[in-house]
Amino acid sequence: MTDPLLALRPWESPEVTSWGRLPMNAVDRRAGAHSLDGDWRFQLLSAPHAPVGGAWSTAAVPGVWTMQGTDDLPQYLNIRMPFADVPPLSPADNPTGVYEREVDVPAEWTGRRIVLQVGAAESVLLVHVDGRPVGLSKDSHLAAEFDLTEVVRPGERSVLRLTVVKWSDASHIEDQDHWWHGGLTRSVLLYATDPLRLADVTVRARQDGELRVDCLVRDTGGALPEGWYVSGELEGLGPVGLELTQDAAFDLANAEDERVSAFLGEARMQARVPEVRTWTAETPELYDLTVRLHRADGRVADVSRHRIGFRDVEIVGRDLLVNGERIFIRGVNRHDFHPLTGRTVSYDDMRADLVLLKRFGFNAIRTAHYPNDPTLYDLADELGFYVVDEADIESHDHAHEIADDPRYLNAFVDRVSRMVLRDKNHPSVIIWSLGNESDYGANHDAAAGWVRRHDPTRPVQYEGAAKLGWADPKLASDIACPMYAPLEDCVAHALSGEQTKPLIQCEYSHAMGNSNGTLADHWAAIEATPGLQGGFIWEFWDHGILQTVNDGRPVGRGGAGLYDNGVTAPGYRWAYGGDFGEKDHDGAFIADGVVFPDRTPKPVMFEHREISAPVRLEGFRHEGLVVSNHQHFRGLEWLAGRWELSLADGRTLTAPAELPALLPGETAVVPLPLELPADGGEAWLTLRVTTAEELPWAPQGTDVCAPQVRLRAAEPVTEQTVASRVEVDAEGLLVHPLLTAAPTLSLWRAPTDNDELGGMALRWRTWGLDSLVRKLVSVHRDGVSVTVDAEYAGATGVVRHRQVFTPVDGGLRVEERAELPEEFDDVARVGSVFETVAGLDLLEWFGQGPWESYPDRSGGAPVGHHSLPVDALFTPYLRPQESGGRHGVRRFTLSAPDATGLAVTLDEPRQVSVTRFTAEDLTAAAHHDELTPRAGCVVHLDAAHRGLGTASCGPDTFPSYLVAPGVHHWSWTLRVL
Ligand code: GAL
Ligand code: MG
């Protein structure tokens, strides 16, 4: 007999979103439930109709089978669907995972209602118990619950089978930009309740302490027994305790409805909490609320526990307000990702993500592009994040057809409403998002209508609607939430007088490879322009999957310890699109996060930490330093400070700092903490700010920010020429005992992802900048100086280059001049490159640092004395590219452990990089396992270096960060230590 679930062909029926599935609600049943996680019997069929065989393997639940040894491997596609079938069809070849296990139903559950909860399954879930069909569900990132009371027997053993069909009509609306997987990605639970139970609890907790708790009580049939009631108990983090009782007036009003029996199953409790401590991302104050359903004799039939926060969200004019304050959204888009498990993330993983974000100044998350595991919201409430909760709808490849397709109407409303029903009680959730990149149609308006009615307390956003008109009130978006809008367009809109909605970019500053140029410029504009409130960086993760190089398979769960600091062990690498043999893929576009696949922060994280500094130094006047509090809701009590004065002569003086008592937005002038020595040259004063106490997300002493002011500018240095001989070879190349490759002109950098996808690298290659041919023109000796003229010929133009070598006290001065033809109007760099002997493994420099910085990503790195091993200077962006630069370098030494080596002094602060790879090495490699580090160092000193921008998806850098054609001058002095 055909299984009725299969007979429905639910994988090609978008109208069928579920069958036998229980309504979503906000009663958390995780505590006290029986976990069914662990190893299950497993087999992978070639299609849902294929017969289940006798040969089982095992699979870990939760987990994706695509990472557990099957031949169905992960595939990365951004927009294109992985199959040609148009909506609502799916391919005949359709991997289908059959998971099976025995379940022992506890004998003490007799008389109780027994519920199965499947945390998440992608994309169609079919449930059978002992061969009997129980239900089906779609919506791959939300739980599905099924009532098993009629199909299992307490005290007995049943066989539970979960069949997961990978491709379906639903895949067409789950076309998000990440890996395609298949499996059960979240936990599976079994729990029991009284047949009469709390079916839902809705909490409204306002900034003024007003609390309303609406309870929905359901039974399995029949009238509510006489005398049952609900109660509530609120426990504060302090002494506040509050008893809540059922609101009789509300019940009475309900009872007056004569069409129903006396009890509608709705009960309300209300209270006002005195001196309430309000919730914000800065002050995540939570109260424990316990809601109880009582039998007539007072005994408890059901309990629902909530951690609630009192706060208001509203839009007033064009401002998004939390508790009446216009906040800044320092957000990031976060996918569920793990390099070993694909999509399954544990409590520890989620906590680690949020702790890291907190430490780097982020205060907001967009759950791109689907509802996350419930734990993520608990953690966001607890640690303090504003959340844009996004429904699992992205129909990118077929967006236009689906947005108005009535066959998908149910799915849109189902997905959005289920998310709202589940997450409505989280204070962290401040905005609902209808999904991503799905065009705009009636299906969206239907979903928005449902939300607005059900939850009038939060705004709704949807980029696909907002893009039709940032100020248009008719569209289903209360926020103007563009993606990758040019900054000047945002500013112009805010200044236009036409703005009606808060402007918060749902995605901006695309973090692919070496990127996030102009982030500091964005924030300078956001903070200075009323109407702009921030945005969400795209994105948190580089989704590299740990892969064995020789057989190309995902390593899977056993791979912990095979990576460190973003770098994989030999024989392994981070796989991106194409690395699993996929014919269709979108390459390294999956590696576009602010952290590596092992969560190691990329340099942009440090930049972000400074940009979002809660305390700033606004400047230096003769009365002292202007210190300000840049937070919205709290003072500086949680911070400690230390002053650090860095002098160009190498000295660093320190003094303890006492942070002034400042309310949000206030400034104060504090006296200069250290006397500025009369000598020592350029001087920078830094306020090193750390956490003063242990916080849930940081131990005491964790770095928070390091704002800085310059107290004295550099003085020009004059170097004495000495009588000594400079050696150059027959090609006019410098001969120096510490250099294995003489300084030559460089106009090439290993293209960043932005350079490649933005089209710059193509122009550079067309000009021949990757293979300039040097030709010596002349060598002149003039006294002690040697002047070498050379030409560097590209495919379409010639660069004239001159070097003048002059012996100076203790070394050699190199004065350089390069003249770029007009057609080379946007090159990567103009500068010198040379290579050193092996053994010089420590870089010490005076300049910005210590983290990597570039001209348009240097807003935060403080000027000071920094030192790092050469190997630690390089950032291993997944696809090798330009990396390791330091901006604003005044001088540096490269030394061996015995302190011998070389010292370079630059004429002015310059972009410098010291790595083990030439630009050509990096250009030629697609993965790091293809690179062999050189024993010596490759040193670049740039007269000019192009900004990074974000052109892999979004705006390029600003014109002010481009390298102009024409004449460039730079000079530097090389000394032997
Ligand atoms: C956006 C999209 C994201 C991601 C990003 C590029 O258009 O919403 O999912 O694809 O571009 O990395
Ligand atoms: Mg997309």
Image (cartoon, helix red, strand yellow):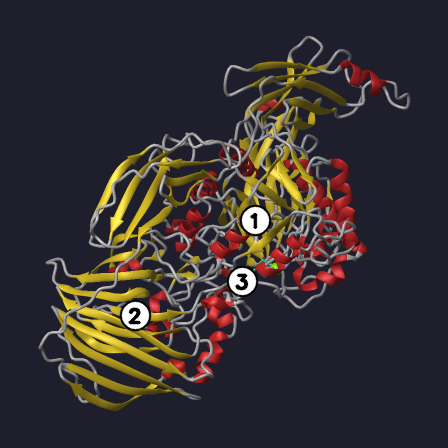
Measured from the top left, where is residue 934 in percent x and y? 24, 69
Asked which quadrant contains residue 315, the reply is top right
Asked if the residue under mark 1 is in contact with the one under mark 3, i.e. CB atoms within 8 Å, the reply is no
Q: CA distance from mark 2 to mark 1?
A: 35 Å
Instruction: Assign a secondary structure to mark 1.
Output: strand
Residue 462, how many percent across, how many down? 68, 51
Judged from the image, the secondary structure of the residue bearing numbered disc 3 is: strand
Dot 2 lies on which element?
A: strand
Query: Which residue is identified by label 2?
Result: 940
Count numbered badges in the picture.
3
Q: Nearer the viewer, mark 3 or mark 1?
A: 1
Q: Amino acid at mark 3?
A: Tyr
Callout 1: 10 Å neighbours few (<14), some, many (20+)?
A: many
Can you identify the residue that label 3 sits on? 76
Q: Is residue 710 visible?
A: yes
Give 780 or 215, whichever is nearer the viewer: 780
The kind of residue tagged 1 is Gly
**Residue 55, can we see it?**
no
Q: Left or right? Give the position of 632 relative to 929.
A: right
- List the residue tagged with mark 1: 534
Residue extending furthest toward the top:
297
Q: Which residue is outermost to the right? A: 258
Sequence-wise first label, 2 or 1: 1
Residue 167 against residue 644 in the figure, above or below: below
Q: Answer with left or right where residue 70 lies relative to residue 719.
A: right
